[in-house]
Each structure stands twice: as C-alpha cells, then as structure tokens.
Image (cartoon, rainbow, N blue to C red):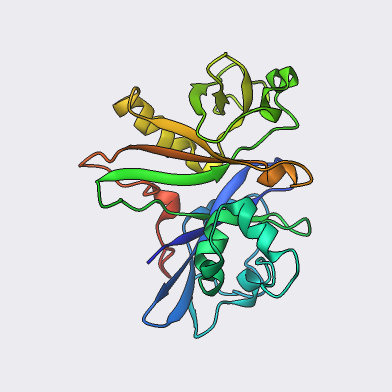
Amino acid sequence: MTTLFLGWQDPKSREWFVIGSLGRARGSYWFRYVKGARRAQEKGFSPLLAFPNINEVFESPALFPLFQNRILNGERPEWPDFLRQLNLSEDIKDDPIAVLARSAGRRATDQLEVFPKPEKAEDNRYSVHFFLRGLSHVRAGKCGRHKEVKTGERLWVCRDPQNDRDPDALLLRTEDLCGIGYVPRYLRDDLNELLDRHRDALKVVVEKFNEPPAPLQYRILCKASAPWPDDWEPMSGPEFQPVHADD
C-alpha cells in the first residue's frame, strides 16, 4: 500500500508544511492529520472543510472528493496525453492513488499538493519519481538546457546555500554544469541524507521530457534512486507522525 502525504503552502510566507496522510487498506480509504499540521496552524492553517476535526481518522469506501477532484477524469479526451506526460500506462486508470502519487494533484485554486512516501524496492533500493521544479525561476536555466534534456540523461544534485530565496534548496544540474531546476521541497531531507550516506550512489536521471504544450509543472519527469540504508526510514521525522488527541 502506498501512503500519500498532503502538503499545504502558507500563501504569505510560501513555506510548505506536511499536514496529513492518505492511504488505502482493506478496501477503504483513510485520511488523518499529521503533526506538521500543528505547525501549519501557527501560520494560519485551519482544518480542511472535508476533514474538520484534526484529531479524527476519516474513512470512506471511495476516494475522498478532495483527492478525487485532483485527478483528471479518465473519460476526458486529454486523458491519454495526461498519462503519457506522467509516464504511466493506461491500466493505471483504476488506481487513483498511483495517479495522485505521480501527478501531485496540484490545482490553481488552493495551496495543496500530494506526494508519496517512498517504499523500499525488492532490490533494497530507494526509488522515487518527481517533476523538476523552478524551471521558470532558476537563473542558470537561461542557458536553455532545460529545453534540451534527453530521456536517460543523468542529473547531479547540488546544495545551493547561496540561494537568497531558499538556502536549503537542492539544485539539479546537467553534466555540462547547467542548473535546470530544483528538487521538490518534500524530498530535500531524504536526498540530503542519501547524499551524506551515498554521495556517489545517489543517482537522478531524466525519465521523460514532455515537449510543449505540456505545462511546465509536467515538463521534466525525474527518477532518483540510491541504496536504502539499513537503519533509515524516509519521511519519518516528527512532522510526518500522526496527530493524537492528547498532542
């Protein structure tokens, strides 16, 4: 079973917080808030209308509308193109969790984003897909290399402490030293840890480049992989832990 997390961005500070988790078990779906929601409340976050009690575990036989509405209707004519952009096969139609995990479920009408918790592969490796961020903002991207990347091309993860907007950002660059975009914020702690443990073994490759008119948010699909440390669990910090009534 894949666990998805829900992130919320403070519209004023632009800071992101993980606020909840979504999963599927025994034929039903569940949603619960995580402790990052407590920190988000300090920035003005209020419980979502669909999930009004921050201490409750919500269950449903069908995917909650808040999440279902973030998936393109499979009957729409653009559905096949959408799946190609995500690099997913047509048979994924009956697995909304998998579609959300790849697409992030972002909408222009709110500050929410969905992302998956990485799971250990059968070969004991860490593996996660993500779309490159910041293509329209990274200054180094003016070299134009983000328009020329190829499927299978390797990218290198670089810390960017002199970034005046976000000193914790992780930049991805090409072999010819051109920065083309950033790792999503929700993956930074994991990739920083893997950089420290397996600097040479952490590998990021371009899995798919989507030509325009694909939107920028779905332009460059990447895959990060590395050996899975024996004593480590991704996305396991305090903010990812479930909220309890006595917290």
227 left or right of 24?
A: left
Report whether residue 181 is seen. Answer: yes
- Residue 90 position (above or below residue 173): below
Where 20 sits versus 228, above or below?
Answer: below
Compared to residue 161, the image places residue 126 above or below, namely below
Residue 114 appearing in the image: no
Residue 134 in percent (x, y) is at 68, 34
Residue 132 on image: x %, y %: 61, 38
- The quadrant where residue 144 appears: top right
Q: Quadrant of the N terminus?
A: bottom left
The residue positioned 56% from the left and 62% from the top of the image is 99
Q: Residue 50: x percent and y percent?
A: 64, 75
Q: Residue furthest left?
A: 230
Q: Nearer the viewer, residue 60 or 133?
A: 133
Image quarter hosting the C terminus: bottom left
- Residue 62 in the image: above or below residue 235: below
- In screen coordinates, is 107 left or right of 157? right
- Which residue is pictured at 59% across the width and 53% down the height? 86
Specify whether 157 is left or right of 139: left
